[in-house]
Image (spheres, helix red, strand yellow):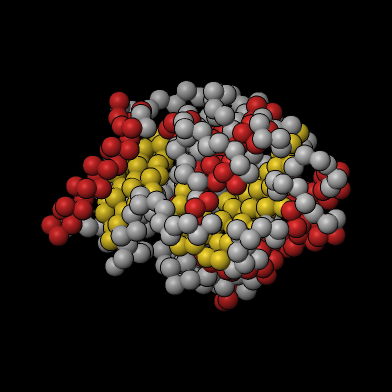
Amino acid sequence: MKEKPNIILFITHDQGQFLGCYNSPQNPNSLNTPNLDKLAENGVRFTNHFCTAPQCSPSRGGIQTSLYPHQNGLMGLVDRGWTLPERNKTLPMYLKEQGYTTHLMGFQHEVFDAYSLGYDTISKRRPEPLYNCQKMNKDYQKFFETHQNEENPFYLCIGVTQVHRPFGVWGEPVDPNGVIVPHYLPDNKIVRDDLSQFYGAIEGVDNCIGSIIKQLEDLGLRENILFIYTTDHGEAYPRAKCTLYDPGLKTLLLMSWPGSVIFEHNKVYNQMISNIDLLPTLLELIGAKIPKNIEGKSFMPLLKGETNKFRKEIYSEKTFHEYYDPIRSIRTEECKYIINFEKSEILYQIGMDIQQDAIGKYMSEQIKKTRPNEELYDLKKDHTEIHNLIDDPNYKDIVKELKNKLYEWMKRTDDPILKGKIKHLRQEPPIRY
């Protein structure tokens, strides 16, 4: 067995925590995902894993750099003219310094030119819908066969466009009567029909994971592979994607390495962690020095059982999606404080991909109300984040404390919003991402 594990990072689009093994009173679902559930049973699962931003490119940039979007410069979507500046050091660059060969197969959404991310090889660039795991399954098999006897360990990032809208292109819908409607959506035919397609798309990815695991087992590779399954941000539903409520920020994270006792079977961690913490964790795991100029923290002490405490606060942000909408938040285990820097006549943004479907058109009519400048939610009493307590005198001290901490974080990380409106320096992306 190699001293360092091969690493596979499988990342989906817009999945939130929709997976069978994540079914809970706070995040109920009735998904049938046996392969991913088995991956969790054979490894570790994180129930309070948060992204830095509820949109694709900014969140993925955080994973790549272990920096917040306003620090690494990726504050909007690549297809809207943003790209990760080349001054940033990325996860594949760090791993290459530790003897890894690094590879990208499929989708990425951090830069215009995928080659600038530092991978040794990248798969053929295709139109985004073709980066789905069903169409690329043979490519995965070929990669594993080619690299099964390499001396150096490999890092492989598998990016898929599933489960981005429109859901219907990824699989057959399930029975609408069998889905569980999340708390932030009304229970009606429009919502159930939409969720049935979402479920079908996710279950299609689960089948792909089963195929990949079998390929690895057949080639004798599985024992020494750290397999990581995650997604970029919350699900593509109103009051989730594009918002700083938990459904927009909570994401799934599974990690499984059969050859290591650190990744205990069926271990569940409830501590709050951020997706910027993955990079330093991987570096510590393979014995590399953690750089000082990043924001992430290694959660290896959790995995080793050296502590049961981790982050006290989670910080998240949104600046640009389809339009300028700067929002910042701080979350503790007890409360969440959100500040909205721009006035709005709708309660929250619904992304254009959601608005194009019936559920988005329906919900757009329900949220035509003036948005408050500040929001506070008591997560112990109101995990649904429905009752805004910003003007409740009983929470005056909590508001002050969280607001001060949020502004201290913004000052320490040099958030440009503190200097006024952030300009979008739009660029025209070449067709290489």
Of 177 and 379, which appears nearest the observer? 379
State the residue at coordinates (44%, 26%): 424
Q: Residue furthest bottom?
A: 177
Where residue 328 sits, quadrant-wise, is top left
Query: Would you place residue 21 above or below residue 156 in this image?
Result: below
Q: Residue furthest left?
A: 393
Horizontal side, residue 100 vs residue 191: left or right: right
Q: Position of residue 202 (x, y in %)?
A: 64, 61
Horizontal side, residue 243 vs residue 266: left or right: left
Horizontal side, residue 398 vs residue 211: left or right: left
Of 413 and 347, which appears nearest the observer? 413
Horizontal side, residue 197 vs residue 104: left or right: left
Q: Position of residue 320 (x, y in %)?
A: 44, 36
Query: Would you place residue 407 above or below residue 239 in this image?
Result: above
State the residue at coordinates (40%, 56%): 309
State the residue at coordinates (55%, 46%): 281
Where residue 257 sits, quadrant-wise, is bottom right
Q: Position of residue 433 (x, y in %)?
A: 66, 33
Of 380 and 286, which appears nearest the observer? 286
Whether residue 323 is visible, yes or no, is no
Of 28 and 275, which appears nearest the observer? 275
Q: Position of residue 283 (x, y in %)?
A: 58, 41
State the residue at coordinates (57%, 76%): 177
